[in-house]
Every structure is written in structure tokens, then in C-alpha cells.
Image (cartoon, rainbow, N blue to C red):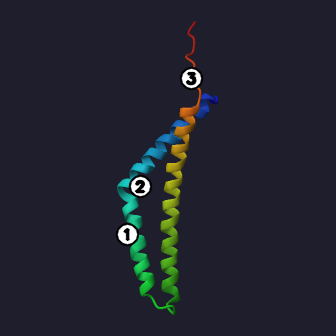
Amino acid sequence: MRKITEEQREQLENEQIIGRKAKSTYEAYIKDFVTNKRQSLFMAFSELPLSAEKELMEVKRMLFAIDTLEAEIVSQIDTGRMATQVLEEAEPEQPKEVH
């Protein structure tokens, strides 16, 4: 077990909350959107001739934007998951004595 300060505990709890919200939002709204958008971009890409450079670059740009969005959200989810793990492994807080 490791000791964490009150400040660290507060930061980890905030990361947990953000991670849970990100996971909920991702599962409810973003996951299906990303999957469907990737499919439509793949279809668009496969139908374009190699000579359509501008259109191919636009498909690539949109795929990059989708991948970046998803990576950011997954990163928040993972950070929240790691914060939970650290909090579970931390020594329990000692009750403060009142004089």
C-alpha cells in the first residue's frame, strides 16, 4: 500500500469522475458514431479513384479527426480507471483526532 496526500486523493477522485463521465458518454453516443463514420469513410475511400487526390486527402483528414477524438476520450477513461486503481491500493485515510 502506498500513502497519498489529501491533495493527491482529491485529484484522483476528480480523475475518476471525469473518467466515468467520459465512459458513459462514449458508450451512449460516441462509440456508435465513430464506428459508423469509419465505415462511411472507408466506403467513400474505396469508391474514389486514385486520381481524386483532394477527396482522398479530405477522407484522410476526417479519419484523423475521428481517431483523435476517440483517442482523447479513451485516454480520459483510462486515466479514470488508473485513478480508481491507485485509490483502491492506497492506505485508508486515518480519522483526524478532535481535541
Marks 3,2: beta carbons within 8 A: no
The residue tagged 3 is 93
Quarter of the figure with the N terminus: top right
Using the image as rendered, state which of residue 77 and residue 17 is in the foreground: 77
The residue tagged 1 is 36
Q: Which mark is residue 26?
A: 2
Q: Is residue 78 above or below residue 30?
A: above
Sequence-wise, which precedes: disc 3 or disc 1? 1
Marks 2,1: beta carbons within 8 A: no
Using the image as rendered, state which of residue 91 and residue 50 is in the foreground: 91
Q: Is residue 85 above or below residue 70?
A: above
Which residue type carries mark 2? Answer: Tyr
Quarter of the figure with the C terminus: top right
Q: Residue at 55% across / 34% down in the picture?
A: 87
Q: Residue at 53% across / 88% down in the picture?
A: 53
Circle 3 Cα neighbour tier, 10 Å, few/some/many (<14 / 14–19 / ≥20): few
Q: Residue at 48% across / 85% down in the picture?
A: 55
SS assignment at label 3: loop
Circle 1 Cα neighbour tier, 10 Å, few/some/many (<14 / 14–19 / ≥20): few
Q: Is residue 85 above or below residue 35?
A: above
Q: CA distance from mark 3 to mark 2?
A: 33 Å
Residue 80 in percent (x, y) is at 51, 44
Residue 38 in percent (x, y) is at 43, 71
Q: CA distance from mark 3 to mark 1?
A: 46 Å
Sequence-wise, which precedes: disc 3 or disc 2? 2
